């Protein structure tokens, strides 16, 4: 089982003193690594995430476990399963003495990919290719695909990474909001509803970090704004904020040492989100006219700049993942 004390203590630590356009990806790798380790007693680390999984063994093992959970779910809830895509096909793979980069490793990874496409029906935009993992060509798509695999598994009652649990929580809040047509009146019952949801669906849940420190962290990050009047970000309810002049609503959550924002169908870090929306940060990151699609052309400066190296290859052009 998960070492939940670790999860909770990490969540209460102060934010990591660096920022980069890849931080959201690092946060996702941390989350997926912990999830894999909890499920399979592995020792996957965020810093060596691709290396840990490049033989494809753990991926194929997981695929077969999703098949099993899906089968169990179908037996218990035939009506619900009839409306879902239920994967069945056993993924054949070699589990022992697989050298990274070998033909067998590539074969394992390729079989996993085929299962993702054909059995889970994962859309192309979230898929990766064998070389993305084996030659580490595209870390982002590999990570996004695994998150989607985890999302599907969660629907069959499997343990979900914390990010996926947060998505479910936010979606539930949005449904409630739509149902009542009012803003910000529902947060009181969230914990009990989440428990009810967990017992009804049979899904296993890691402990979600509480929102106590969230507003403090948000104000700390927002405090780095140097605009003549501070970039507006107003708390509407726990974990929900109105930002900018457009009064757009965003959901914010703490994931270990990262403050994450739910944007579109994906996640970004709050700092990276503000880099693209807060005028003073846009200006300090980019000499050209600021725009949401502009990648940072110079290394981050300012209070959060630190000697900590950026993680992974720089791929600043891609938008944050869903
Ligand atoms: Zn500003």
Image (cartoon, grey):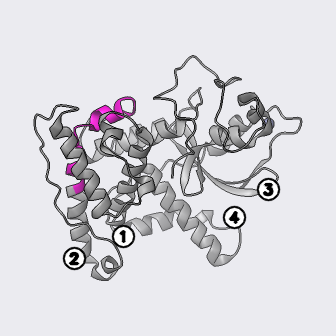
Instruction: Determine if the C-beta at disc 4 is less than 8 A from ligand 1.
Output: no
**Could you tell me which secondary element the residue under label 3 belongs to?**
loop
Q: Which mark is residue 184?
A: 4
Given residues 59 and 186, the one toward you in this image is 59
Q: Which mark is residue 120?
A: none
Position of 163 with respect to 136 (left or right) is right
Position of 218 with respect to 107 (left or right) is right
Cα distance in 3D space between marks 1 and 2: 14 Å
- The mark nearer the N terminus, 3 or 4, is 4
Looking at the picture, how far across and down is residue 230, in whole percent? 83, 39
Residue hosting label 1: 201
- The mark nearer the N terminus, 2 or 3, is 2
- Foreground label between 2 and 4: 2
> How crowded is the residue under tag 4: few (<14 C-alpha within 10 Å), some, or many (20+)?
few
Q: In which image quadrant can residue 89 be found?
A: bottom left
Cα distance in 3D space between marks 3 and 4: 18 Å
Q: Which mark is residue 246?
A: 3
- The mark nearer the N terminus, 1 or 2, is 2
Residue at the image point whose x is 71% and y is 72% from the top = 182
Residue at the image point whose x is 69% and y is 36% from the top = 221
Residues at discs 3 and 4 in contact (Cβ within 8 Å): no
Cα distance in 3D space between marks 2 and 3: 48 Å
Position of 276 with respect to 204 (left or right) is right
């Amino acid at each position: 089982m998960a070492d939940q004390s670790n999860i909770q203590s990490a969540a209460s630590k102060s934010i990591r003193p660096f920022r980069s356009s890849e931080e959201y990806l690092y946060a996702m790798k941390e989350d997926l690594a912990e999830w894999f380790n909890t499920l399979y007693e592995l020792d996957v680390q965020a810093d060596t995430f691709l290396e840990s999984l490049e033989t494809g063994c753990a991926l194929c093992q997981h695929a077969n476990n999703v098949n099993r959970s899906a089968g169990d779910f179908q037996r218990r809830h035939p009506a619900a399963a009839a409306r879902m895509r239920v994967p069945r096909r056993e993924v054949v793979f070699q589990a022992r003495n697989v050298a990274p980069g070998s033909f067998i490793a590539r074969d394992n990874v390729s079989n996993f990919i085929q299962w993702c496409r054909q059995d889970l029906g994962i859309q192309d935009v979230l898929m990766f290719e064998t070389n993305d993992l084996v030659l580490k060509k595209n870390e982002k798509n590999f990570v996004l695909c695994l998150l989607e695999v985890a999302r599907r598994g969660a629907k069959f009652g499997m343990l979900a990474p914390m990010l996926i649990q947060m998505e479910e929580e936010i979606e539930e809040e949005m449904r409630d909001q739509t149902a009542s047509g009012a803003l910000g009146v529902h947060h009181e019952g969230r914990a009990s509803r989440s428990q009810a949801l967990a017992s009804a669906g049979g899904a296993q849940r890691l402990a979600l970090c509480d929102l106590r420190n969230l507003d403090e962290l948000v104000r700390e990050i927002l405090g780095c704004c140097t605009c003549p009047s501070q970039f507006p970000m107003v708390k509407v309810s726990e974990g929900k904020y109105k930002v900018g002049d457009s009064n757009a609503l965003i959901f914010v959550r703490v994931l270990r040492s990262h403050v994450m924002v739910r944007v579109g169908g994906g996640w970004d870090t709050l700092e990276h989100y503000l880099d693209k929306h807060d005028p003073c940060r846009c200006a300090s990151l980019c000499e050209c006219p600021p725009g949401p699609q502009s990648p940072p052309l110079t290394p981050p400066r300012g209070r959060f700049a630190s000697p900590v190296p950026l993680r992974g290859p720089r791929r600043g052009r891609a938008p944050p993942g869903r």
